[in-house]
Amino acid sequence: MNLIALESSSRRLSVALWRDGALSERAADVPNGGSERLLPWLVELLSDAKLSLSDLDGVAFGAGPGGFTGLRLSCGLAQGLALGLDLPVLAVATLEALALASGADKVFACLDARMNEVYGAAYVVHGEALETVIAPFCAPPSAAAAPPGKGWLGCGDGFASHPELLGDAIGAALVGVRPDLWPTAAAVARLAAPRLARGEGVDAALAAPLYVRDKVALTTAERLARGGLK
């Protein structure tokens, strides 16, 4: 089974090829833009594996939450590929991909959501499967839900952008923090492959980002209320 995965929800862009369990990936830190990289990376991966687009069985993408522009980029590209090749699409939550990429068993995934908010979720990892303990949410750091108990690894740039998360209940639950970790296309592929094998892919027209938050900007009053600048 051959699967292409796309991840562009953050500044860390990546494309991965799953080939019967073997993974290859292209990735780079791209703070702004990067849309011109995804297709060339995809072509390179297929060429290195001596495959063509017609050899693919499905397309997966990091569905969010994350940057609105990045989510639309990977979703649109996945839809375009799937529509042209008549392939199923699999939307994978980026916080799940971040948790799996960490290599830890208990993960509190947290990404900077801008606007003085964070995206967060908590998962227990069982091999290639994840158990959701706290579903994805978007909230100010002061209102972020803490994972139950102790022994959780905090992952994602939310901890770098909002160090106040390390205080009180969340800090007490964590055994360590990895703010340098990002969702990866390789992790998206690992999560998508068993779903594709079970026939869980959807038609390209039904694929959609998981925004969690439906606002792209705050009013001046809202920014000031959250401690932001006018």
Image (cartoon, rainbow, N blue to C red):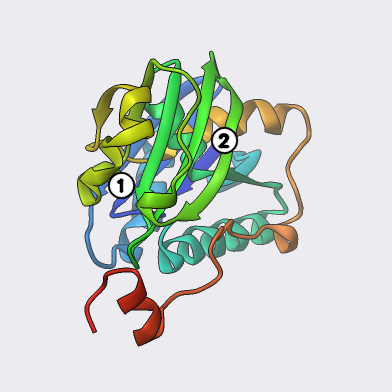
State the CA–CA distance, disc 1 to disc 2. 16 Å
77 on left or right of 218 = right
| Residue 91 shows up from this direction | yes
**Residue 134 numbered mark, or none:** 2
Q: Secondary structure at mark 1?
A: helix
Question: Closest to the observer: 95 or 31?
Answer: 95
Q: Quadrant of residue 223?
A: bottom left
Q: What residue sits 26% from the left and 73% below the top? A: 228
Q: Which residue is mark 1?
A: 158
Q: What residue sits 64% from the left and 60% below the top? A: 208
148 up-or-down from 9: above or below: above
Q: Position of residue 8 (x, y in %)?
A: 40, 54
Q: Residues within 10 Å of mark 2 (few under 14, many from 20)?
A: some
Question: Closest to the observer: 211 or 47?
Answer: 211
Q: What residue sits 22% from the left and 78% below the top? A: 229
179 up-or-down from 13: above or below: above
Amino acid at circle 1: Gly
Question: Closest to the observer: 45 or 168?
Answer: 168
